[in-house]
Structure formats: C-alpha cells, structure tokens
Image (cartoon, rainbow, N blue to C red):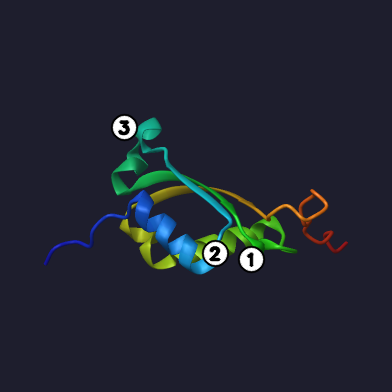
C-alpha cells in the first residue's frame, strides 16, 4: 500500500481558498531553510500570508484555528511547521477591522 502524496503549496492554497475565501493569499515553502533539521524529514516548513473577511472580529488565535481547520486532514501529509500571518481586509475608511479587546 503506498503512502498518501505529500502536500504542496498548490494544495495548501486550494484548501485555504475553499475554506476561507481570501482576498489575498500567498503560501511560501520555507523548507530549504531547514534542510538537515530533524523535523524536516516529516514534512515541509510553510508560511501562509492570508487576508480574509472570515477573520473579522476574531483574535489572532481564532484566526489561526480557522487556518488549521482548513488544513486539518493534510497536516500529517507533509506539513511539519506552519507560520501564519492572518489579517482582515482593509475597511472602506482605510483601516482594518480589529479584534475585540481581551476580557479582563
């Protein structure tokens, strides 16, 4: 029985587009920076830059959870490390929607 194919940038982008309808998306394969690192054997290192209205009003941790949820079933197929830069689109006034203040 053969192993499932390893994940690649195109598959990460496809899943994020389907789940989060981003207005901007860039996925970088940073694996070459980690050649020889023990963890590199189990998968690649990626950075996701994503802008989506789905993140509006959410704190950073919730934004990251949405990204991980979109990739959940492929995380064990070649993603060793995932850096996430998740933002919301600019508002008509030129700013960005902010997450709510922390309860305190």
Is there a contact, CB below 8 Å, between mark 1 and mark 3? no
Is there a contact, CB below 8 Å, between mark 2 and mark 1? yes
Dot 3: element: loop
State which mark lies toward you, 3 or 2. 2
Q: Residue at x 48, y 62 (%)?
A: 17
Side (left or right) of 37 relative to 103: left
Q: CA distance from mark 1 to mark 3?
A: 37 Å
Mark linked to residue 21: 2
Quarter placement of the C terminus:
bottom right
Name the residue tied to disc 1.
54
User: Counting residues from the N terminus, which is met first, the one under dot 3 or under dot 2?
Assistant: 2
Categorize mark 1 by other alpha carbons within 10 Å: few (<14), some (14-19), many (20+).
Answer: some
Name the residue tied to disc 3.
36
Dot 2: element: loop
Categorize mark 2 by other alpha carbons within 10 Å: few (<14), some (14-19), many (20+).
Answer: some
Q: CA distance from mark 3 to mark 2?
A: 35 Å
Give coordinates of residue 32: x percent, y percent.
Answer: 35, 33
Side (left or right) of 10 relative to 83: left
Q: Residue at x 75, y 64 (%)?
A: 57
Q: Relative to residue 51, is residue 53 depicted above or below?
A: below
> Where, by quadrant of the figure, is residue 1 drawn?
bottom left
Give coordinates of residue 2: x percent, y percent.
Answer: 14, 63
Q: Relative to residue 63, is residue 49 depicted above or below?
A: above
Q: Residue at x 47, y 67 (%)?
A: 18
State which mark lies toward you, 1 or 3. 1
Q: Residue at x 83, y 52 (%)?
A: 93
Give coordinates of residue 46: x percent, y percent.
Answer: 44, 45
């Amino acid at each position: 029985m053969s192993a499932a194919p390893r994940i690649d940038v195109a598959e990460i982008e496809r899943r994020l587009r389907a789940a989060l309808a981003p207005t901007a998306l860039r996925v970088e394969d940073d694996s070459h920076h980690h050649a020889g690192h023990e963890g590199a054997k189990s998968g690649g290192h990626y950075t996701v830059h994503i802008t989506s209205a789905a993140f509006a009003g959410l704190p950073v941790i919730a934004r990251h959870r949405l990204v991980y949820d979109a990739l959940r079933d492929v995380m064990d197929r070649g993603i060793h490390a995932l850096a996430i830069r998740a933002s919301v689109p600019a508002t008509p006034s030129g700013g960005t929607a902010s997450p709510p203040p922390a309860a305190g």
